Image (cartoon, helix red, strand yellow):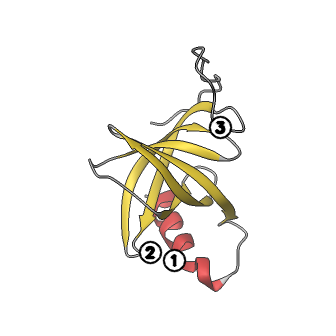
C-alpha cells in the first residue's frame, strides 16, 4: 500500500540547484518510454512543480524523454531525464497531462495504461 508523506526534503547546507523545493511522497507510477512501446513500474519518491525523483522497479538506466504516469492522480508527466544515481532517476517536467479529462488521441495509449493500472 502506498501512502503520501507531506514532509519537505531537508536542506543539508549544499547549494540547491532546483528552482522549487521537492516534497517527499510515496505513490505508484508507471514509466513509459521507447515511444510508448515499453513500460516499467516505479515509485515516485519526491515531487515538485518542476520535477520528481522516481525509483524504477527494475534496475535500469533511463535517458532522454519519458512519460511518468501518476497512477493515484491520473496525470502523466512528459519529462526529461536529468540524472541517474543508484536506483533513483531525476526527471524534469516539460508538461503535465490530465489523463482523466484529456480527449486528445495522442494521449490515448497513456490513458489506457493508466486505466489498466488504476483498476488492477
x, y percent for residue 37: 38, 76
Q: Residue furthest front?
A: 15
Do labels 3 and 2 touch, CB within 8 Å? no
Taking the spot 53% from the left edge, 50% from the top edge, the residue there is 91
Taking the spot 44% from the left edge, 59% from the top edge, the residue there is 31
Residue indicated by mark 2: 36
The secondary element bearing badge 2 is classed as loop
Q: Is residue 103 left or right of residue 87?
A: right
Could you tell me how far apart the alpha carbons at marks 3 and 1 are, in whole angstroms?
31 Å
Q: Nearer the viewer, mark 3 or mark 1?
A: 3
Residue indicated by mark 1: 109
Circle nearer the N terminus (3, 1)? 3
The secondary element bearing badge 1 is classed as helix
Circle nearer the N terminus (3, 2)? 3
Q: Residue furthest top?
A: 13
Residue indicated by mark 3: 18
Picture quarter with the C terminus = bottom left
Picture quarter with the N terminus = top left
Amino acid at each position: 500500500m502506498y501512502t503520501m508523506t507531506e514532509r519537505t526534503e531537508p536542506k543539508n547546507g549544499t547549494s540547491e540547484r532546483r528552482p522549487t523545493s521537492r516534497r517527499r511522497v510515496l505513490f505508484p507510477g508507471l514509466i513509459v518510454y521507447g515511444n510508448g512501446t515499453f513500460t516499467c513500474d516505479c515509485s515516485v519518491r519526491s515531487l515538485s512543480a518542476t520535477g520528481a525523483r522516481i525509483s524504477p522497479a527494475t534496475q535500469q538506466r533511463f535517458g532522454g524523454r519519458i512519460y511518468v504516469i501518476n497512477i493515484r492522480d491520473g496525470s502523466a508527466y512528459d519529462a526529461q531525464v536529468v540524472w541517474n544515481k543508484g536506483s533513483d532517476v531525476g526527471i524534469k517536467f516539460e508538461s503535465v497531462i490530465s489523463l482523466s479529462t484529456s480527449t486528445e488521441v495522442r494521449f490515448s495509449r497513456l490513458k489506457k495504461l493508466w486505466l489498466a493500472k488504476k483498476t488492477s
